[in-house]
Image: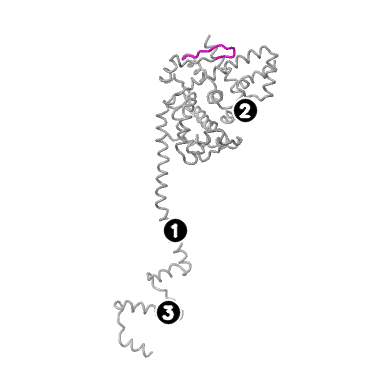
Amino acid sequence: MAPRNGLLSRNLAALDALNEMSTPLNAQADPDVQLMLAVQQGDQAAYYRLFEKHVAGVIGFAMQFVGNRARAEELAQDVFLQVYRTRSRYTPRARFKTWLYRMVTNACLSELRRPEHRVHLQPLDPPLREEIDEPTASVEVPSRSGEEIALDREAVDRLRAAVAGLPAQQRAALLLARVNGLSYEEVAASLSCSVSAVKSLIHRATVTLREQMRSDAE
Amino acid sequence: MDHCRAVKGEFTAWCDGELSRMEAERLEQHLASCAACSAEAESVSGAVRWQRQALRHVTAVADHECAPLQARLRRALATEIEPRARGQFWSWIFRPVAIATAAAMIAIIVLFSVLGGPNAVLILLGVEAPPVAISREPDLFEDYQLIQHLDAMENFDTVESVPLDEDQALREG
């Protein structure tokens, strides 16, 4: 599917802004940057390596905004096509992931503005649901006090619903930092806001989710 | 209390290691002296650790589930890349032809400008008749008749024979 022109132009403007605002980065520091530079030189194998490395993360992120797997995949495809089309504009001034998720975030937030794609979160697709049902898929998370937290399917579903209830900016900031491993500065670059705004967004999202999970458990 | 409210907003960033050393020290000093904030900080810290793990499950997509998308992307890209590659092939084939054509055009333009315009070349090639000026000012073109004559001699069969009386008049005159 061809990306919409509006989305492409917004992303191009955002990428240019990212190129300007970020400090120069040693390309050796990020292997993905090396791959992207190879893509710029016409190396298609490098492009598909980047795709394989990041596509699952992009789909998982997009699903939290568009609410269904099929649309999330379309959106991921649009974003990766944009990566290829805008390869000549890429300058290694930030981590590749920051550059990529800036496009992904813009695409997701644009999608939310479209009336026909209001968020209707659906249950997990069957394969993943089964995976979590398996005992080995449960997660035990140690709290600070040493208490072990078991995460079952119900907890994941509750958390998903709680995440879907967060305002879009909070949701994006939280996922970028907690799941995709971006620093607050990188999240700020992705969302085109200040680091202090990101601090506030992530703190409010964290506290809201905690309260939501507590109230659901009671 | 205001200080507590301001500090609470920093708890998540502190847990994520996103505070500067000075900011972290100031916050930790406060926690050491405020039991309520200390308890809240511990709670936020637990939530951050839990969410870090749990959110990965919420967004989890297995790699093998992405294979169909990769196939679609390859197809979508092929429509962009292949025509371009084909275009490059044809441009490689036609490049010498294009260069030769351009060189010929330049040569013709130079020839026209040196010889005084397209008519000069066409006359030279025998496509067009010489201008009337030649007959009006024959001195300027005295060699032209000779050339014409020599040309006629070469193509003797096609030249009509000159009537005898005219030929005699020419000799006498």
Residue beneath the point at 41% across and 20% down = A127
Q: Nearer the viewer, residue B38 or A188?
A: B38
Q: Which circle, 1 or 3, is nearer the viewer?
A: 1
Question: What label does residue B143 carry, if any?
Answer: 3
Q: Quadrant of residue B40?
A: top right
Residue B27 % position (x, y): 68, 19
Residue beneath the point at 60% across and 22% down = B16
Question: What label does residue B102 carry, if any?
Answer: 1
The crowding category of the residue bearing disc 1, from other C-alpha atoms within 10 Å (few below 14, some 14 to 19, many at least 20), is: few
Residue A102 % position (x, y): 54, 31
Q: CA distance from mark 3 to mark 2?
A: 92 Å
Kind of residue indicated by mark 2: Val
Q: Quadrant of residue A174?
A: top right
Q: Is residue A148 above or below residue B99?
A: above
Q: Nearer the viewer, residue A29 or B47?
A: A29
Left-right relation of A206 to B147: right
Q: CA distance from mark 2 to mark 1?
A: 59 Å
Residue B107 % position (x, y): 45, 63
Q: Quadrant of residue A167?
A: top right
| Residue furthest to the top | A218
Q: Pinpoint the chain carrying mark 3.
A: B
Q: Nearer the viewer, residue B10 or A208?
A: B10
Q: CA distance from mark 1 to mark 3?
A: 35 Å
Residue topped by disc 2: A195
Q: Is residue B78 visible?
A: yes
The crowding category of the residue bearing disc 2, from other C-alpha atoms within 10 Å (few below 14, some 14 to 19, many at least 20), is: some
Instruction: Tell me the magenta residue range.
Output: A142-153
**Which quadrant is the N terminus of chain B positioned in?**
top right
Residue beneath the point at 41% across and 36% down = B76
Q: Pinpoint the chain carrying mark 1.
A: B
| Residue furthest to the front | A28
